[in-house]
Image: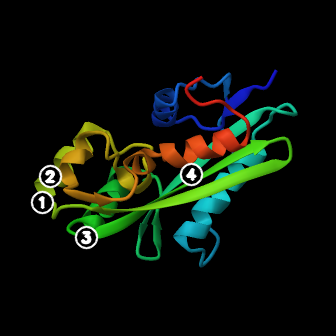
């Protein structure tokens, strides 16, 4: 019996998998060092994180393991999950009135084979006033989110334009993820 393991503690990824009719048999978030290497660019960093996560998840032979990493990039700068409200404020101020990239890399492992794909989307954040930043931070929605915001929550009101994959920005690009899971032999909408 092939098991399906989600290597992520993200409630958003679990929800998105539900849109594909998938419920993992187990949820096992891997514990890896997510520190970028010196001079590492956002896209290669994101792909490396997804690969390292999928390799770190314990699974039986034949299990299908899915991991993903979402990285917010402002130019060459990686904006990870803010440590506190001050860092979230700094991230939002830096993105205010500008476009940034949201990269989500997905890795699927079955036995010793790995399938992977990354999706890059462009997001424009409106010019934010101090009052808007303060009000958004008060929602607490920034916690645990790359770049300090989640497009699917209250921050959606701060984003007038995107180009790319909405589900990729949320944390799991569904079209690409479905393709990878099918390549690994998992039935989608079964």
Tag 1–tag 2 contact (CB < 8 Å): yes
> Which residue has dot 1 on it?
129
- Residue sitting nearer the eye, 2 or 42: 2
Q: Which mark is residue 69?
A: 4
Q: Nearer the viewer, mark 3 or mark 1?
A: 3
- Quadrant housing residue 100: bottom left
Instruction: Return the disc, 2 or 3, that comes first in the chain's sequence.
Output: 3
Horizontal and vertical percent position of residue 168: 45, 50
The residue at the point 75 percent across, 25 percent down is: 3
Q: Crowding near pointer 2: few (<14 within 10 Å), some, many (20+)? A: few
Q: CA distance from mark 3 to mark 1?
A: 14 Å
Mark 4 residue element: strand
Q: CA distance from mark 3 to mark 4?
A: 23 Å
> Which residue has dot 3 on it?
98
> Which residue has dot 2 on it?
132
Instruction: Return the disc, 4 or 1, that comes first in the chain's sequence.
Output: 4
- Residue sitting nearer the eye, 37 or 157: 157
Q: CA distance from mark 2 to mark 3?
A: 16 Å
Mark 3 residue element: loop
Q: Which mark is residue 68?
A: none
Name the side, left or right, on which 47 lies relative to 55.
Answer: left
Q: Is residue 172 visible?
A: no
Q: CA distance from mark 1 to mark 2?
A: 5 Å
The residue at the point 34 percent across, 55 percent down is: 88
């Amino acid at each position: 019996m092939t098991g399906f393991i989600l290597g992520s503690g993200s409630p958003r990824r679990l929800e998105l998998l539900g849109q594909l009719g998938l419920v993992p048999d187990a949820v096992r978030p891997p514990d890896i060092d997510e520190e970028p290497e010196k001079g590492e660019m956002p896209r290669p960093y994101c792909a490396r994180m997804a690969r390292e996560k999928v390799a770190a998840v314990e699974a039986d032979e034949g299990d299908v393991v899915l991991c993903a990493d979402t990285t917010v990039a402002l130019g060459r700068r990686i904006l990870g999950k803010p440590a506190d409200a001050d860092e979230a404020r700094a991230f939002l101020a830096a993105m205010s009135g500008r476009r940034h990239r949201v990269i989500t890399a997905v890795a699927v492992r079955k036995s010793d084979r790995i399938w992977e794909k990354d999706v890059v989307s462009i997001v424009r954040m409106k010019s934010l006033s101090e009052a808007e930043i303060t009000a958004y931070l008060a929602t607490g929605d920034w916690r645990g989110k790359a770049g300090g915001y989640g497009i699917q929550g209250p921050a959606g009101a701060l984003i007038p334009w995107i180009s790319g994959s909405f589900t990729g920005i949320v944390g799991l690009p569904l079209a690409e993820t479905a393709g990878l899971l099918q390549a690994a032999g998992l039935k989608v909408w079964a």
